[in-house]
Amino acid sequence: METPRAQRARQAADVLRRQITQGAFADGVLPGERALGERLGASRNAVREALSLLRSEGLITRRQGVGTTVVKPKYGHGLDELAGLAETLDGHGTVTNEVRAASVTRPPAAIAEQLRLPPDAEVVHIERLRRLAGIPLSLDTTYLAADIGRPLLQHDLAGRDLFALIEETTGERLGSAEVDVHAISAGPDTAALLGIPAGAAIFAIDRVTSLADGRPVDAESLHIRADRLTLHATLHRRPVR
Amino acid sequence: METPRAQRARQAADVLRRQITQGAFADGVLPGERALGERLGASRNAVREALSLLRSEGLITRRQGVGTTVVKPKYGHGLDELAGLAETLDGHGTVTNEVRAASVTRPPAAIAEQLRLPPDAEVVHIERLRRLAGIPLSLDTTYLAADIGRPLLQHDLAGRDLFALIEETTGERLGSAEVDVHAISAGPDTAALLGIPAGAAIFAIDRVTSLADGRPVDAESLHIRADRLTLHATLHRRPVR
């Protein structure tokens, strides 16, 4: 069972994670343990344990002579509206994509179903490792209905969001997406690609995106570094029924 | 770097995770490796590796004579609207809460700021381990503005959502919440409370909820088992500007 100190350490880590996410430490340097303890209402031991939890999340680092610093601010990825990574991170740096696969193929049956295609239909399969300012952020596997995907193979898959490319090549606007967010431990191979330790927590996101007319055209699995990205949403209370 | 087989195993695991989440295996039993391979368009080795990834996520289990079965279906928690756990899981079983703390206290400075309270203001601090049908699902730490929180201490914290209690006791409707979703590895103590292996991936959610008039009254940190819960959202494309 959890000891009272472990409980206080967890609560202190929660508050610190929140502050780091919100950019409370503008210069990226955290106060010393004593000052943090006062700020968090926690003992020095609890502060130390909280810092250790956040270090294991890859959020902070400790360096001799410098103290405790934020590794890098986390980027917020909105869950409020449907947007591509480059759109979302506009202003934070350039998104570049290492194209690992881009071909016409037959999809797994489950993907064909999601795209409402006959079992023997062809799709365009694209896999990209996406980097922000050179640092891996997301590994995206995409299956596109063939008529939507084929024209994209001629375009700049290394530099552009697929959403923007789909809208440009079809002349149609995307409508909505059904999104399932999982938190999983990265397997050793995925971790190596993303540049994180094996077993680190990542987001695995299943997303099926439809055109404005409701036709599903894009089924994706995104593996996103959770030490670099936070998912943000503003939720509203449902009107009384 | 990732081998082609590891790549195919990851892709197969993604498709299977998606199907399991959507309840594709009604009886909870997965087909054999050969049938799965045909369904996923993957070799038997890749299927085996995919099953091993999903086993390490706590999603499936393998039992002699029974085969591969889904441990338990994942519950979907909507990110579309603001709702308490019991509201969301209505129909899936009874939510019960082990109340681990419920007192008036002074909050960490960061929490006071979030609730727009003076640094020396009191708050009500509530911590609850929440179970669905007896199985731990979420560990919630809540700080409430004192005028909102005090009346709640007289109510059924073991059986009710705080959202519903706030609306009943104030006679006011909640408005909206700002939500930050993190994926982290559970520390040993949190993991023990939630009944999962240390280091397993969980959701850590920071949520600040306001009344309909815009006043923030409820700052929470939720630690949610990711092997039992998926976050779901329907996202819409922003109109062209």
Image (cartoon, coloured by chain):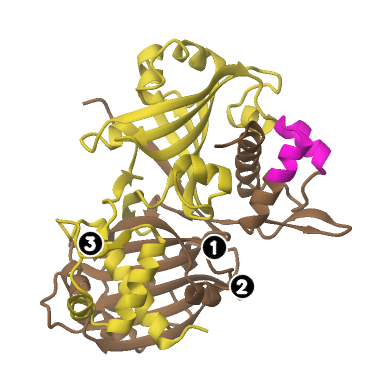
Chain colours: A yellow, B brown
Question: In terms of sequence position, does the residue under pointer 1 or pointer 3 come before the other?
Answer: 1
Q: Secondary structure at mark 1?
A: loop
Look at 41% across and 20% down and name the residue there.
A157
Chain of the residue that carries numbered disc 1 in the rendered image = B
Q: Are marks 1 and 3 on the same chain?
A: yes
Is residue A35 rendered to the left or right of residue B96? left
User: Does B110 appear above or below A75?
Assistant: below
Look at 28% across and 76% down and name the residue there.
B143
User: Does A56 appear above or below A220?
Assistant: below
Q: Are marks 3 and 2 on the same chain?
A: yes
Q: Magenta stretch: dominant SS?
A: helix
Look at 53% across and 55% down and name the residue there.
A199
Q: Which residue is mark 3?
A: B212
Q: Which residue is mark 2?
A: B133
Q: Nearer the viewer, mark 3 or mark 2?
A: 2
Q: Quadrant of the N terminus of chain B?
A: top right
**Amino acid at dot 2:** Ala
Residue A241: percent from the left, percent from the top? Answer: 39, 57
- Characterize the local packing of mark 3: few (<14), some (14-19) or many (20 or more) Cα atoms within 10 angstroms: some
Look at 70% across and 48% down and name the residue there.
B51
**Amino acid at dot 1:** Ala
Point out the residue furthest to the left here.
B118
Q: Nearer the viewer, mark 1 or mark 3?
A: 1
**Amino acid at dot 3:** Ala
Q: Which mark is residue B115?
A: none
Write the start and end of the magenta stretch as one range. Answer: B32-49
Q: Nearer the viewer, residue B120 or B42?
A: B42
